Image (cartoon, helix red, strand yellow):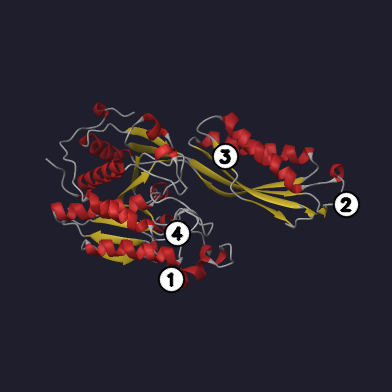
């Protein structure tokens, strides 16, 4: 916990917002991509995504903001500051996981629009440039492009990434971009080098605040992530004619490895986590012993040395299983993102805003990845958490109490006031 005496105290008045408008807009956004099987599926550059982006753009225009869509589809709403300079920005992502919840990303988008709208209505033109942003993609649900929108802003796109990456139907990212009127050759034009501070409001996506009965958290560190691809090779064989003791079943070997991955994370202890999220087999036929199995591992830890040790242990255990079962295994790194420490300066602004609301915030580590971790290379980035009821997220029943949604948005607006307007006296 951070205590009031650790934060430089200013006389700060909590900014008022239109609570009904905030909650109504969250509900409106949740209808874009509502999935028949439950939850919300709003994938990058799909019709549901286009509808959601148009909705956010309309809200920004209603507030009188200068609205533009950048080269990868991020939507920005801007009000010029009387003294110009580097911009103060708030927002989050509009895409979802498949059958995801109504708040992950969406809360930060709607709250940013509401905060900027309320500030301009109450206090007029800011001293600093003030912007809200609906970031096009963070989840990697359609393409393996996690944090595509933030990486574009931070100049972290890979060469030829749009032409190289394909979705499950074989559509390239470049083709999908053209389908919504974007030119992949211009993606680099999304880079911003004029952002001073980026502030993101987000649901915690974990149980800490909810279980402790606390209402607000300020994120200090976002955990590092390693994505691995494990390929297991055995021998395909006839499902009826091949005796059990003679088989080199790749899927059975992979299954033992999956259990070993989970056990490695459990033995490492919190906050280490490891998840096998996808698995496929070849030839994928009911009457053939699998000759190949391939699965992914998502391994996370907030300390870099411990994360490297976890990845090494996962790799070692997979090789042990392969050797015991006379199989071949290859462990390949797909992605490695180090842990990120967010801005203490902007974090203190958030803490002061929390104190203005009568809440002492909890200092937190985020196990989930966020746009703020990428934008921390381009700006002083900070994050504010509100509770996830039951710690639920990435699922249709994700929820946060309405009063906490309102509180988080008011605190966000109060922090943006300190950053973008002259300090309150």
The quadrant where residue 366 appears: top left
Q: Furthest-left residue in view?
A: 425
CA–CA distance in space, label 2 to label 1: 52 Å
Q: How far apart are labels 3 and 2 at the CA level?
A: 37 Å
Q: Quadrant of the N terminus?
A: top left
For label 4, the crowd category at 10 Å Cα-Cα, with few meaning under 14, some 14 to 19 and many 20 or more, is many
Mark 3 lies on residue: 274
Q: Nearer the viewer, residue 130 or 137?
A: 137
Please report whichever mark, 2 or 1, sits nearer to the chain's N-terminal start.
1
| Whether residue 124 is visible | yes
Residue that carries the numbered disc 4 in the rendered image: 42
The vertical placement of 240 against 346, above or below, is below
Q: Are marks 1 and 3 in contact (CB under 8 Å)?
A: no
Q: Quadrant of residue 361?
A: top left
What whole-number distance in Å separates the C-alpha atoms at marks 3 and 4?
Answer: 26 Å
Relative to 278, 2 lies left or right: left
Q: Single out the mark in the foreground, 3 or 2.
A: 2
Secondary structure of the residue carrying numbered label 4: loop
Of the image marks 1 and 3, the number of the one nearer the N terminus: 1
Write down the quadrant of residue 265 in the picture: top right
Query: On residue 90, which mark appears?
Result: none
Give neighbour class at mark 2: few <14, some 14-19, many 20+ (Cα, 10 Å): few
Residue bearing the label numbered 1 = 180
Q: Which residue is mark 2?
A: 241
Quick one: SS at disc 1?
loop
């Amino acid at each position: 916990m951070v205590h009031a005496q650790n934060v430089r105290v200013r006389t700060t008045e909590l900014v008022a917002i239109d609570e009904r408008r905030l909650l109504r807009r969250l509900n409106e956004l949740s209808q874009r991509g509502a999935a028949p099987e439950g939850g919300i599926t709003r994938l990058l550059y799909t019709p549901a995504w286009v509808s959601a982006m148009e909705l956010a753009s309309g809200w920004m225009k209603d507030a009188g903001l200068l609205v533009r869509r950048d080269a990868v589809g991020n939507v920005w709403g801007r009000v010029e500051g009387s003294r110009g300079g580097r911009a103060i920005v708030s927002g989050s992502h509009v895409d979802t996981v498949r059958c995801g919840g109504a708040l992950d990303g969406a809360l930060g988008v709607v709250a940013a629009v509401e905060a900027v709208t309320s500030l301009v209505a109450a206090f007029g033109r800011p001293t600093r440039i003030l912007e809200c942003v609906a970031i096009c993609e963070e989840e990697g649900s359609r393409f393996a492009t996690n944090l595509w929108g933030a990486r574009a802003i931070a100049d972290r796109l890979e060469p030829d990434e749009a032409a190289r990456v394909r979705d499950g139907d074989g559509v390239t990212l470049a083709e999908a971009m053209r389908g919504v009127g974007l030119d992949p050759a211009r993606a680099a034009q999304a880079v911003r080098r004029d952002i001073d501070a980026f502030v993101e409001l987000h649901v915690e996506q974990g149980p800490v605040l909810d279980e402790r009965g606390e209402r607000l958290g300020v994120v200090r560190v976002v955990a590092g992530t390693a994505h691995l691809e494990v390929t297991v090779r055995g021998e395909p064989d006839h499902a009826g004619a091949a005796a059990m003791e003679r088989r080199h079943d790749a899927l059975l070997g992979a299954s033992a490895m999956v259990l070993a991955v989970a056990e490695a994370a459990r033995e490492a202890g919190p906050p280490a986590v490891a998840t096998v999220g996808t698995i496929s087999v070849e030839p994928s036929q009911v009457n053939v012993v699998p000759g190949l199995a391939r699965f992914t591992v998502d391994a996370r830890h907030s300390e870099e040395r411990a994360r490297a040790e976890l990845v090494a242990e996962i790799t070692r255990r997979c090789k042990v299983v392969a050797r015991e079962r006379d199989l071949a295994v290859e462990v390949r790194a797909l992605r490695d993102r180090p842990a990120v420490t967010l801005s203490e300066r902007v974090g203190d602004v958030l803490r002061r805003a929390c104190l203005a609301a009568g809440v002492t915030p909890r200092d937190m580590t985020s196990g989930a990845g966020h746009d703020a971790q990428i934008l921390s290379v381009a700006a002083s980035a900070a994050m504010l958490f509100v509770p996830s009821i039951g710690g639920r997220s990435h699922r249709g029943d994700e929820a946060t109490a309405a009063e906490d949604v309102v509180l988080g948005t008011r605190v966000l607006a109060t922090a943006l006031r300190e950053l973008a307007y002259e300090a309150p006296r």
